[in-house]
Image (cartoon, rainbow, N blue to C red):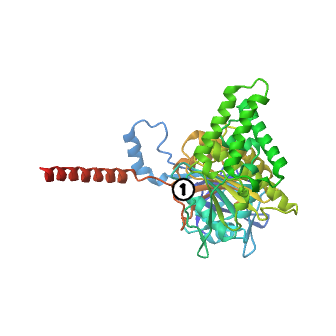
Amino acid sequence: MKKIGVCVGQTKPNKVNFVSNIPLKLGQFVILEYEENSQKHNLLGMIQSIYRENPYIAENIKNPQQAEDFRKFSSSQDTIKGEINIIGKIIDIGNEVFLEIPKTPPLPASPIYEAPASVLRKIFGEKSKNFVKIGKLLSEEEEVPVYIDINQIVLRHLAILAITGAGKSNTVSVLLKNIVNLGGTAVVFDFHGEYAEAKLTRNGKNVVNKITPFINPAYLKAKEFASFIGIKQNAHIQYRYFRKAFENLIQNLEAEKGKNWQAYIDTENFLNRLKEEIEKLQETEDRVNKDSLFEVLNKLEDTILELGHIIKLGAPPLIEKIKSGYINVFDFSEFDEEVADTIASNLLRWGLEERKKAVRGRETKLPFPVLFIIEEAHILAGERINTDSKYWISRIAREGRKFGIGLTIVTQRPKGLDKEILSQMNNMIILKLVEPDDQRHVQKASEALSSELMEYLPSLNPGEAIIIGNMTKIPLLVKIDKAEEKIEGHDIEVVNLWEEILEKESKEQLNDIEEIIDNI
């Protein structure tokens, strides 16, 4: 092993300061070696903070030229100093390495060595079929693959956080590819239509199941259908009118045709009768607020006009469209936030209920574990909004591990996420974050993100990330793999479009001139 420094000053069981004359890297793994009571100790540590110091170039130097002059004769006096976070005592049993929490501080002046790649591969490599490769350690010279525990992602949930362009789509692509290779099932809420045409495959077969979210009113609660047509949660009078009309219609249809009434009425007639039930309230209700009643009618008619093509009586529940072993994509790109909330909350509610049935041995529409991946999560689970989806996301975050239903929330606006939900994400992949408010919001939600690592977030390059949580046990700086079947963000080539338009206009002008000449 290559010696790179020594411990200095006061040592603690979990932290030591060090000094070195070799350039080192933040996040680099090291081994502290010492002998005490005839017993040899090898401790694995990670450089948590680092700085360079020259005793001749002090902070109180005010003249730049003076600093440069001192530099010429004192460069040999440079020292590297910093802090090492001790991760654990290395227990090497041959094929695998275990880490045992140290209970006593190491000896001062203990030598520090580069951690051999062979040891790191044993620690961060594949330990069982649950582990999949996500990338490689960022701060090591030799390539050290990093594996994460998919089991822990589903059971303990995951947040993928980054500014636009930092590599969120690529990270999700790597995750999805690993899931389908294991025969796993994922459901993606896709707000930008990025996943619907993705070419994710397993053994050469496309495993993306694009689902058109047909809405069957018969499977919606009155509150969900009201939200679908745009009745907001604080519009209590509008909701009361709609709920009464909706429930009256269902009761009437069941009285006329029985529980299987859907077989005897088409969507158009159902919606027309719903409008009639709303209009009847003018006569049956005391002191009707006509403005609110007409607003309900207007919203229903507008929804029929704009989204009538996805309202379909007789369509099976959306949860039945989810295929085992596939990436099931619900394309929300044509919907506004209220409609997306209705569809998402319906799926999340059914998902939790059906997984409970599965665990309890009852007949279920989801007999397999499933991971919900929520893009633009701040839309459905924002800090300052109350959506139906937010309620079910919170429920699954708390209860999902018991029933094999997991969450992955993805956003470029961490500060916009509900902090309670974010704190339930026990695993995080944090790519580049620049805004201080975003960084603070994330740190409050995760005790594992130290202030030193947080300071590193703005300087991460695309594809570089800090990984923390149960899926890795210790915080890691990782270069995420580049997905072969990457899901691309839909960035528009603005300049190319401008050039095409300009070229088209030039051709049209030339044709106009030629036509004038021909007519002379």
Q: Residue furthest left?
A: 520
Asked if residue 368 is positioned above or below residue 469 in the image, the reply reads: below
Q: Is residue 461 in sight in this rendering?
A: yes
Residue that carries the numbered disc 1 in the rendered image: 167
Question: Which residue is more in the foreground, 219 or 332?
Answer: 219
Under circle 1, the secondary element is loop
- Whether residue 432 sits left or right of residue 237 in the image: it is left
- Whether residue 513 sits left or right of residue 452 in the image: it is left
Asked if residue 418 is positioned above or below residue 265 in the image, the reply reads: above
| Residue 51 point in image, percent of width and height | 54, 49
| Residue 518 point in image, percent of width and height | 14, 53
The mark tally for this picture is 1
Question: Which residue is more in the foreground, 135 or 508?
Answer: 508
Residue lying at 47% horizontally and 45% vertically, measured from the top left: 56
| Residue 445 point in image, percent of width and height | 70, 44
Examine the image and state in which quarter residue 107 appears. bottom right
Residue lying at 76% horizontally and 38% vertically, measured from the top left: 245
- Whether residue 506 sits left or right of residue 292 in the image: it is left
Residue lying at 82% horizontally and 44% vertically, measured from the top left: 251
Query: Are there few (<14), some (14-19), or many (20+) residues within 10 Å of tag 1?
Result: many
What's under tag 1, amino acid-wise? Gly
| Residue 322 point in image, percent of width and height | 70, 62
Q: Is residue 447 in sight in this rendering?
A: no
Question: Which residue is more in the foreground, 165 or 120?
Answer: 165
Q: Quadrant of the N terminus?
A: bottom right
Residue lying at 63% horizontally and 61% vertically, measured from the top left: 30
Examine the image and state in which quarter residue 276 appears. top right
